[in-house]
Amino acid sequence: MKTIELKKKINGQIVGNELLFFNEIESTNRYLYQKASKNDMPDGTVVISDSQSAGRGRLKRTWISPKGKNLYISVLLKPNIIPNDATIFTFLASCALKDTFDEYGVNSKIKWPNDILIDGKKVAGVLTELKINSVSVEFIIVGIGVNINMTNNFIMCVMPDISHKVTSLSIELGKELMREEFAATLINNIDDYYLRFLKYGKSNILSVWVEKWGGIGTELEILDGEKTYKGLVESVDENGFLYIRDKDGKLEKVIAGDIAF
Ligand code: BTN
Protein backbone atom coordinates (compact mmCIF):
# COMPACT_ATOMS: atom_id res chain seq x y z
CA MET A 1 0.00 0.00 0.00
CA LYS A 2 1.46 3.35 -1.03
CA THR A 3 0.82 5.38 2.07
CA ILE A 4 1.91 8.73 0.63
CA GLU A 5 -0.59 8.34 -2.23
CA LEU A 6 -3.31 7.58 0.28
CA LYS A 7 -2.49 10.50 2.56
CA LYS A 8 -2.59 12.91 -0.40
CA LYS A 9 -6.13 11.87 -1.25
CA ILE A 10 -7.61 12.17 2.23
CA ASN A 11 -9.48 15.42 2.65
CA GLY A 12 -11.93 14.98 5.52
CA GLN A 13 -12.19 17.01 8.71
CA ILE A 14 -11.95 14.31 11.37
CA VAL A 15 -11.62 10.80 9.95
CA GLY A 16 -8.11 10.09 8.66
CA ASN A 17 -6.35 13.05 10.26
CA GLU A 18 -4.31 10.46 12.11
CA LEU A 19 -3.27 7.39 10.10
CA LEU A 20 -1.33 4.30 11.15
CA PHE A 21 -0.09 1.61 8.74
CA PHE A 22 1.12 -1.92 9.27
CA ASN A 23 2.39 -4.61 6.95
CA GLU A 24 1.08 -7.33 9.20
CA ILE A 25 -1.03 -7.14 12.33
CA GLU A 26 -3.22 -9.50 14.32
CA SER A 27 -6.35 -7.45 13.76
CA THR A 28 -6.71 -3.71 13.09
CA ASN A 29 -9.81 -3.67 15.34
CA ARG A 30 -7.99 -5.36 18.19
CA TYR A 31 -4.93 -3.14 17.86
CA LEU A 32 -6.97 0.06 17.87
CA TYR A 33 -9.14 -1.14 20.76
CA GLN A 34 -6.11 -1.91 22.91
CA LYS A 35 -4.29 1.31 22.02
CA ALA A 36 -7.33 3.51 22.53
CA SER A 37 -7.98 1.85 25.91
CA LYS A 38 -4.51 2.84 27.11
CA ASN A 39 -3.82 6.14 25.40
CA ASP A 40 -5.80 9.17 24.48
CA MET A 41 -6.00 8.74 20.71
CA PRO A 42 -7.73 11.37 18.56
CA ASP A 43 -11.26 10.98 17.25
CA GLY A 44 -11.09 9.71 13.66
CA THR A 45 -7.80 7.79 13.97
CA VAL A 46 -7.49 5.22 11.16
CA VAL A 47 -5.48 1.99 11.21
CA ILE A 48 -4.81 0.08 8.00
CA SER A 49 -2.88 -3.15 7.59
CA ASP A 50 -1.71 -4.96 4.48
CA SER A 51 -2.61 -8.29 6.09
CA GLN A 52 -4.09 -9.63 9.32
CA SER A 53 -3.07 -12.85 11.06
CA ALA A 54 -6.27 -12.99 13.13
CA GLY A 55 -8.79 -10.81 11.33
CA ARG A 56 -12.15 -10.81 13.09
CA GLY A 57 -15.55 -11.10 11.52
CA ARG A 58 -18.88 -10.79 13.21
CA LEU A 59 -20.36 -13.59 15.32
CA LYS A 60 -16.79 -14.56 16.35
CA ARG A 61 -15.94 -15.67 12.81
CA THR A 62 -12.51 -15.27 11.25
CA TRP A 63 -12.02 -12.66 8.54
CA ILE A 64 -9.54 -14.22 6.13
CA SER A 65 -7.03 -11.45 5.44
CA PRO A 66 -4.40 -12.32 2.81
CA LYS A 67 -1.54 -9.93 2.10
CA GLY A 68 -1.49 -7.26 -0.57
CA LYS A 69 -4.96 -7.85 -1.99
CA ASN A 70 -7.66 -6.28 0.12
CA LEU A 71 -8.43 -3.46 2.49
CA TYR A 72 -8.41 -4.01 6.25
CA ILE A 73 -9.24 -0.79 8.04
CA SER A 74 -10.43 0.30 11.48
CA VAL A 75 -11.65 3.74 12.46
CA LEU A 76 -11.72 5.09 16.01
CA LEU A 77 -14.72 7.30 16.73
CA LYS A 78 -15.41 9.14 19.96
CA PRO A 79 -18.90 10.60 19.78
CA ASN A 80 -20.67 11.57 22.98
CA ILE A 81 -23.37 8.90 22.99
CA ILE A 82 -25.02 6.22 25.10
CA PRO A 83 -24.44 2.51 24.30
CA ASN A 84 -27.90 2.09 22.72
CA ASP A 85 -26.99 4.57 20.02
CA ALA A 86 -23.93 2.66 18.89
CA THR A 87 -25.63 0.41 16.32
CA ILE A 88 -25.94 3.40 14.03
CA PHE A 89 -22.20 3.25 13.32
CA THR A 90 -22.53 -0.04 11.49
CA PHE A 91 -25.20 1.59 9.33
CA LEU A 92 -23.06 4.70 8.88
CA ALA A 93 -20.21 2.51 7.61
CA SER A 94 -22.55 0.65 5.23
CA CYS A 95 -23.71 3.96 3.75
CA ALA A 96 -20.10 5.10 3.28
CA LEU A 97 -19.22 1.77 1.64
CA LYS A 98 -22.18 1.87 -0.70
CA ASP A 99 -21.33 5.44 -1.76
CA THR A 100 -17.75 4.32 -2.40
CA PHE A 101 -18.87 1.45 -4.64
CA ASP A 102 -21.22 3.89 -6.40
CA GLU A 103 -18.20 6.07 -7.16
CA TYR A 104 -16.66 3.05 -8.92
CA GLY A 105 -19.86 2.64 -10.94
CA VAL A 106 -20.67 -0.63 -9.18
CA ASN A 107 -24.16 -1.42 -8.03
CA SER A 108 -23.76 -2.79 -4.51
CA LYS A 109 -26.46 -3.87 -2.11
CA ILE A 110 -26.63 -3.57 1.67
CA LYS A 111 -27.58 -6.81 3.39
CA TRP A 112 -28.85 -6.11 6.89
CA PRO A 113 -27.13 -5.53 9.19
CA ASN A 114 -23.58 -5.19 7.91
CA ASP A 115 -22.73 -6.89 4.64
CA ILE A 116 -22.21 -5.32 1.26
CA LEU A 117 -22.99 -7.55 -1.70
CA ILE A 118 -22.39 -7.31 -5.41
CA ASP A 119 -24.56 -9.65 -7.50
CA GLY A 120 -25.52 -11.47 -4.31
CA LYS A 121 -21.91 -12.14 -3.27
CA LYS A 122 -20.15 -10.57 -0.32
CA VAL A 123 -17.58 -7.91 -1.13
CA ALA A 124 -17.32 -6.13 2.24
CA GLY A 125 -18.26 -6.46 5.90
CA VAL A 126 -18.37 -4.22 8.96
CA LEU A 127 -17.55 -5.14 12.55
CA THR A 128 -18.34 -2.47 15.13
CA GLU A 129 -16.93 -2.79 18.64
CA LEU A 130 -17.40 -0.52 21.64
CA LYS A 131 -15.81 0.37 24.92
CA ILE A 132 -18.25 1.50 27.55
CA ASN A 133 -17.56 3.25 30.85
CA SER A 134 -20.48 3.27 33.31
CA VAL A 135 -23.23 4.87 31.22
CA SER A 136 -21.53 6.34 28.18
CA VAL A 137 -19.49 5.10 25.28
CA GLU A 138 -15.76 5.74 25.68
CA PHE A 139 -15.08 4.93 22.05
CA ILE A 140 -16.24 2.97 19.03
CA ILE A 141 -14.11 0.99 16.61
CA VAL A 142 -15.60 0.58 13.15
CA GLY A 143 -13.72 -2.21 11.37
CA ILE A 144 -14.20 -2.71 7.67
CA GLY A 145 -12.90 -5.41 5.38
CA VAL A 146 -13.23 -4.93 1.62
CA ASN A 147 -12.29 -7.49 -1.03
CA ILE A 148 -10.50 -5.41 -3.62
CA ASN A 149 -8.05 -7.34 -5.83
CA MET A 150 -8.73 -11.03 -5.22
CA THR A 151 -9.30 -13.10 -8.36
CA ASN A 152 -11.79 -15.98 -8.46
CA ASN A 153 -8.91 -18.48 -8.40
CA PHE A 154 -7.35 -16.80 -5.41
CA ILE A 155 -10.67 -16.80 -3.56
CA MET A 156 -11.08 -20.50 -4.32
CA CYS A 157 -7.63 -21.16 -2.84
CA VAL A 158 -7.88 -19.09 0.34
CA MET A 159 -11.56 -19.60 1.20
CA PRO A 160 -12.69 -22.76 -0.64
CA ASP A 161 -15.77 -23.40 1.51
CA ILE A 162 -17.31 -19.95 0.97
CA SER A 163 -15.83 -19.04 -2.43
CA HIS A 164 -19.23 -19.26 -4.17
CA LYS A 165 -20.55 -16.50 -1.88
CA VAL A 166 -17.57 -14.14 -2.16
CA THR A 167 -16.49 -11.62 -4.79
CA SER A 168 -14.10 -8.69 -5.11
CA LEU A 169 -14.27 -5.27 -6.72
CA SER A 170 -11.65 -6.28 -9.32
CA ILE A 171 -13.70 -9.34 -10.34
CA GLU A 172 -16.74 -7.12 -10.85
CA LEU A 173 -14.83 -4.45 -12.79
CA GLY A 174 -12.53 -6.81 -14.67
CA LYS A 175 -9.37 -4.91 -13.75
CA GLU A 176 -6.94 -4.49 -10.89
CA LEU A 177 -7.52 -1.47 -8.69
CA MET A 178 -5.43 0.89 -6.57
CA ARG A 179 -6.28 0.07 -2.99
CA GLU A 180 -5.09 3.55 -1.89
CA GLU A 181 -7.74 5.15 -4.09
CA PHE A 182 -10.53 3.02 -2.67
CA ALA A 183 -9.30 3.51 0.91
CA ALA A 184 -9.12 7.31 0.54
CA THR A 185 -12.61 7.51 -0.99
CA LEU A 186 -14.00 5.34 1.79
CA ILE A 187 -12.27 7.37 4.52
CA ASN A 188 -13.58 10.62 3.03
CA ASN A 189 -17.09 9.17 2.83
CA ILE A 190 -16.96 7.98 6.45
CA ASP A 191 -15.87 11.48 7.43
CA ASP A 192 -18.88 12.98 5.57
CA TYR A 193 -21.31 10.69 7.37
CA TYR A 194 -19.64 11.18 10.73
CA LEU A 195 -19.94 14.97 10.41
CA ARG A 196 -23.54 14.49 9.41
CA PHE A 197 -24.10 12.32 12.50
CA LEU A 198 -22.50 14.94 14.77
CA LYS A 199 -24.66 17.67 13.25
CA TYR A 200 -28.03 15.98 12.77
CA GLY A 201 -27.96 12.87 14.97
CA LYS A 202 -28.67 9.22 14.40
CA SER A 203 -32.17 9.50 12.92
CA ASN A 204 -30.68 11.31 9.94
CA ILE A 205 -28.16 8.50 9.31
CA LEU A 206 -30.83 5.87 9.82
CA SER A 207 -33.15 7.40 7.25
CA VAL A 208 -30.34 7.57 4.68
CA TRP A 209 -29.48 3.95 5.47
CA VAL A 210 -33.12 2.78 5.17
CA GLU A 211 -33.31 4.41 1.74
CA LYS A 212 -30.02 2.86 0.55
CA TRP A 213 -30.92 -0.53 2.03
CA GLY A 214 -34.36 -0.62 0.39
CA GLY A 215 -35.58 -3.55 2.52
CA ILE A 216 -38.86 -2.20 3.90
CA GLY A 217 -41.77 -4.16 2.44
CA THR A 218 -39.53 -6.99 1.21
CA GLU A 219 -39.54 -10.64 2.30
CA LEU A 220 -36.59 -11.53 4.51
CA GLU A 221 -35.28 -14.64 6.17
CA ILE A 222 -32.81 -14.05 8.98
CA LEU A 223 -30.98 -16.72 10.88
CA ASP A 224 -30.09 -15.58 14.38
CA GLY A 225 -28.39 -18.42 16.23
CA GLU A 226 -31.03 -21.12 16.66
CA LYS A 227 -33.91 -18.98 15.52
CA THR A 228 -35.06 -18.11 12.03
CA TYR A 229 -37.16 -15.04 11.37
CA LYS A 230 -39.08 -15.07 8.13
CA GLY A 231 -41.62 -12.61 6.85
CA LEU A 232 -42.32 -9.15 5.55
CA VAL A 233 -40.16 -6.32 6.88
CA GLU A 234 -42.54 -3.70 8.31
CA SER A 235 -40.18 -1.19 9.84
CA VAL A 236 -36.79 -0.41 11.32
CA ASP A 237 -36.65 1.35 14.69
CA GLU A 238 -34.27 4.11 15.76
CA ASN A 239 -31.68 1.52 16.85
CA GLY A 240 -31.74 -0.28 13.54
CA PHE A 241 -33.74 -3.26 14.82
CA LEU A 242 -36.03 -4.87 12.29
CA TYR A 243 -39.72 -5.63 12.73
CA ILE A 244 -40.80 -8.62 10.66
CA ARG A 245 -44.41 -9.79 10.26
CA ASP A 246 -44.46 -13.59 9.90
CA LYS A 247 -47.06 -15.59 7.93
CA ASP A 248 -49.22 -15.99 11.05
CA GLY A 249 -49.39 -12.24 11.49
CA LYS A 250 -47.01 -12.13 14.46
CA LEU A 251 -44.65 -9.15 14.61
CA GLU A 252 -41.10 -10.11 15.61
CA LYS A 253 -38.24 -7.82 16.56
CA VAL A 254 -34.85 -8.83 15.15
CA ILE A 255 -31.74 -7.46 16.80
CA ALA A 256 -28.48 -7.05 14.92
CA GLY A 257 -26.07 -9.56 16.38
CA ASP A 258 -22.90 -7.80 15.26
CA ILE A 259 -22.34 -5.32 18.03
CA ALA A 260 -19.77 -6.64 20.49
CA PHE A 261 -19.76 -4.96 23.91
C1 BTN B 1 -18.06 -9.40 8.89
O1 BTN B 1 -18.69 -9.26 7.85
O2 BTN B 1 -18.10 -10.46 9.53
C2 BTN B 1 -17.23 -8.25 9.42
C3 BTN B 1 -15.82 -8.30 8.89
C4 BTN B 1 -14.95 -7.18 9.38
C5 BTN B 1 -13.51 -7.36 8.98
C6 BTN B 1 -12.66 -6.16 9.29
S1 BTN B 1 -11.09 -6.23 8.51
C7 BTN B 1 -10.55 -4.85 9.42
C8 BTN B 1 -11.13 -4.99 10.82
N1 BTN B 1 -10.24 -5.76 11.66
C9 BTN B 1 -10.77 -6.94 12.01
O3 BTN B 1 -10.20 -7.82 12.69
N2 BTN B 1 -11.99 -7.06 11.50
C10 BTN B 1 -12.38 -5.88 10.75
Image: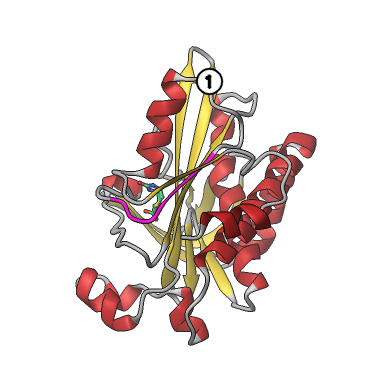
Kind of residue indicated by mark 1:
Asp
Q: Is residue 68 left or right of residue 193?
A: left
81 vs 235, nearest the viewer: 81
**Left or right of residue 73, residue 183 in this image:** right
As helix, strand or loop, the secondary structure at mark 1 comes to loop
Q: Quadrant of the C terminus?
A: top left
Image point (32%, 82%), residue name? 152
Towards the viewer: 61 or 4: 4
Region of the chain picked out in magenta, as a range: 46-52
Residue 121 position within the rendered picture, expressed as x and y whole percent measured from the top left: 41, 74
Asked whether, in this view, residue 188 is left or right of residue 3, the answer is right
Q: Residue furthest front?
A: 4
Against 67, residue 168 (above or below) is below
Ligand 1 neighbours mark 1 (CB distance < 8 Å): no
Q: How many discs mark residues in the rendered view?
A: 1
Colour scheme used in the picture? Answer: secondary structure
Name which quarter of the figure residue 156 lies in.
bottom left
Q: Magenta span has 49?
A: yes
| Residue extending furthest toward the bottom | 174
Check residue 110 for magenta coloring: no
Residue 34 placement (x, y as % from top left): 38, 28
Query: Residue 71 at x, y = what percent?
Result: 44, 59
Q: From this view, report whether residue 93 is shown above or below residue 137.
A: below
Q: Residue at x 59, y 28 (%)?
A: 42
Q: Give the percent coordinates (x, y) of residue 88.
A: 59, 42
Looking at the image, residue 128 lies above or below residue 190:
above
Q: Residue at x 73, y 36 (%)?
A: 201
For label 1, the crowd category at 10 Å Cα-Cα, with few meaning under 14, some 14 to 19 and many 20 or more, is few
Q: Using the rendered image of the protein, determine whether residue 64 is visible from the camera's viewpoint.
A: yes
Residue where numbered disc 1 is placed: 40
Q: Is residue 215 visible?
A: no
